[in-house]
Image (cartoon, rainbow, N blue to C red):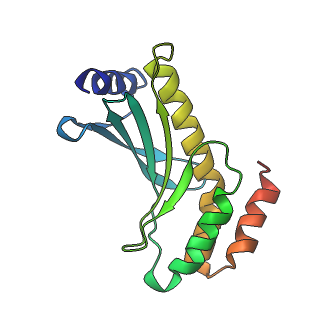
Amino acid sequence: MAALLEQVTAFFERKKLAHHAEAELGLVRLPYQGRAGQWNLVVKVEASPPQLIVYALLPLPAPEGLRARVSEAVQRANWGLPHGNFELDLNDGELRFKTSAFLTSDATIVNALESLLFANTATVDRYLPALSAVIVQGADPRAAVERVDEVTPG
């Protein structure tokens, strides 16, 4: 795991992106500014089997009274996504988006990481306005996701 984590850290250093590695947990944290807002990214390295997991931690939790509506929005957003999925922790309302890939002998860490980061951040940028509308404005989950899908078809 240490070698994989070093490669991930080196990637962010080459890109001159501020990041913080937590070797004991096998992860790297960094802030991300998208078009739709700012959130944190966590890259988790798994050694066996070799795997990279990228989480986008969305900046607004789902309040307890809105979790059913947010869950509906998450399910509607997830439908048909080619890479990754939104997750909602029903206990505390945490929202995140996950992309992951197993690393094979013919896949380089850099290529895999770039692909995962692109799929992750582009999807969060696309759906964050819909999830925000449900949480902040009380928007209808179906309508909020449909509006996003009309503007940026899949």
What is the count of numbered marks?
0
**In this rendering, does residue 66 appear at all?**
yes
- Please state the horizontal and vertical placement of residue 112, each as a whole percent of the image: 50, 26
Q: In the current view of this chain or complex, which residue is farthest to the left?
A: 24
The one of 6 and 19 positioned closer to us in this rendering: 6
| Viewport quadrant of the N terminus | top left
Residue at 17%, 38% (x, y): give it: 24
- Please state the horizontal and vertical placement of residue 137, each as a whole percent of the image: 61, 80
| 26 relative to 9, above or below | below
- Please state the horizontal and vertical placement of residue 41, each as a whole percent of the image: 41, 46
The one of 88 and 120 positioned closer to us in this rendering: 88
Residue 62 falls left or right of residue 78:
left
Residue at 77%, 51% (x, y): give it: 152
Residue 102 falls left or right of residue 85:
left
Residue at 34%, 21% (x, y): give it: 7
- Please state the horizontal and vertical placement of residue 114, each as a whole percent of the image: 52, 28
**In this rendering, does residue 35 appear at all?**
no
| 140 relative to 40, above or below | below
Residue at 37%, 73% (x, y): give it: 92
Q: In the current view of this chain or complex, which residue is farthest to the bottom?
A: 65
Q: In the current view of this chain or complex, which residue is farthest to the top?
A: 106
Residue 39 falls left or right of residue 128:
left
Q: Quadrant of residue 136?
A: bottom right
| 126 relative to 29, above or below | below
